[in-house]
Amino acid sequence: MADQEQDAAAAVRTPTADDALGYEHARDALLEVVRQLENGGTSLEESLALWERGEQLAKVCQRWLDGARERLDAALAAEEAGPPQG
């Protein structure tokens, strides 16, 4: 159980700013938070901290996905418009 508490504390204290996280790193960290919450064995305070961290990581992932969607939409729109006529 002490290992789970250390894992929970490590997941909450991430030295990297969320905005600097890449999608894959944020996704992997979110999966780890979910795993820890599903395993249980953490105190209420640790569980709440993990939940809050998970919410932050989910927002980072969503921002990446939204940005990817915007880029894809822009590329598709440019393709539909055809080459510039000049």
Image (tube, helix red, strand yellow):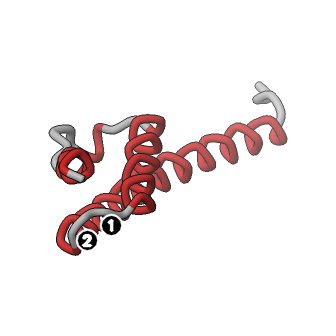
Characterize the local packing of mark 1: few (<14), some (14-19) or many (20 or more) Cα atoms within 10 angstroms: some
Q: Which residue is mark 1?
A: 51
Tell me the element at label 2. helix
Q: Which mark is residue 12?
A: none
Q: Say what amino acid the circle numbered 1 marks.
A: Trp
Tell me the element at label 1. helix
Q: Which mark is residue 48?
A: 2
Characterize the local packing of mark 2: few (<14), some (14-19) or many (20 or more) Cα atoms within 10 angstroms: few
Location of residue 39 by image quarter:
bottom left
Query: Residue at (15%, 39%) from the top-left corner?
Result: 15
Query: Residue at (30%, 63%) from the top-left corner?
Result: 41
On the image, the x and y values in percent for residue 24 come to: 47, 35
Location of residue 25 by image quarter:
top left
Query: Residue at (27%, 67%) from the top-left corner?
Result: 47
Q: Is residue 51 left or right of residue 72?
A: left
Query: Residue at (63%, 48%) from the top-left corner?
Result: 69
Mark 1–mark 2 contact, CB under 8 Å? yes
